[in-house]
Image (cartoon, rainbow, N blue to C red):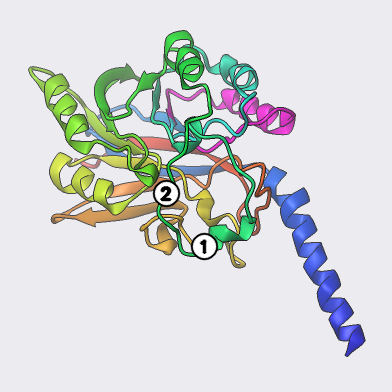
Amino acid sequence: MLVGAAGIFAGGLAVIGWAAGIERRRFVLQREELAILPPGSDPITVLHLADPHLAPGQRKKERFVHSLLDLEPDLIIATGDNLGHQDAIPHLARMLEPFRGIPTLSVFGSNDYYGPVLKNPFTYLLPKRPHTKRERDLDEVALRALLMDDLGWVDLTNRAEIIQAGGLRIRALGVDDPHIKVDRLPQALAALDEVSQDAEWDLTLGLVHSPYQRILDPYVAEVGVDAIFAGHTHGGQVCLPGGRAIVANCDLPVEQAGGLSAWDAGGRSAPLQVSRGLGTSIYAPVRLFCPPEATLLRLLPKER
């Protein structure tokens, strides 16, 4: 019995060691294809980055992100939680500098406002309690100055814009993070109506950090988006073999917590791409059967 218990203990330590020491640094690139462009359009490539949770000393993550420049994306979509430490902004600037000039659509997540706090990492697997308000302790002003003013990212937090990328006119809307209840969908919809006046577009995209159904449903049923991009879930972060998520950290069905699926609402359907993300909280530095990722999507024309 003691031998068996020792074996179980050793096996548990091995799993923890893998999850904390190897898996969370085993960066991968996922590739997907979506036929959502107008017939006759040339294909474009979209790089989806989510949840870097960047902190000082994470050079391997920075090098992986730098390697993605070789993919030559036409458009970058960044779905938030950029920061994982109060001192991360200079490191984020270094990580993102090579992508300067590439059109980028962005929304924020809670970890663009609030730094991580020490807690039991396995509470991620437990039912969520209501969000407790606390003072924002990350430098949002400096973050926006870097991303929007310096790098030229398009801010879609409760906003909408039409941009040019890959030879297409892309209409996009986004909301602030529903997980902390700062989403203002009516404001985003009003902005969408405003930018759509007397305008033409080839494609409509919806962005949100946390893929809550109260945002996904109107994106599909009311707006009729061609695709939705989200992050937040970390793909479940600690998963069963085969990458099967146990939790989604929101009201999204767990089977849709990572990767490409479809979201149906109001008799319509749209592709939903949920990134498993690039990072973790510095206080929950584990991943199991769910390596950190970036996603490259090749958007193709619909059949006539």
Of residues 192 and 69, the one nearer the viewer is: 192
Magenta residues span: 50-77
Q: Residue at x 58, y 42 (%)?
A: 293
Residue 131: which disc? 2
Of residues 30 and 13, the one nearer the viewer is: 13
Of label 1 and label 2, which has the lower sequence position? 2
For the residue marked with disc 1, what is the amino acid? Ala
68 to 178, vertically: above or below: above
Q: Is residue 158 magenta?
A: no
Q: Residue furthest bottom?
A: 1
94 to 180, vertically: above or below: above
Q: Secondary structure at mark 1?
A: loop
Asked where in the image residue 88 lies, by quadrant, the reply is top right
Which of discs 1 and 2 lies nearer the camera? The answer is 2
Quarter the C terminus occupies:
top left
Categorize mark 2 by other alpha carbons within 10 Å: few (<14), some (14-19), many (20+).
few
Label 1 – label 2 distance at C-alpha: 22 Å
Q: Secondary structure at mark 2?
A: loop
Residue 245: which disc? 1
Q: Residue at x 35, y 48 (%)?
A: 272
Q: Which x, y percent locates residue 261?
A: 37, 54
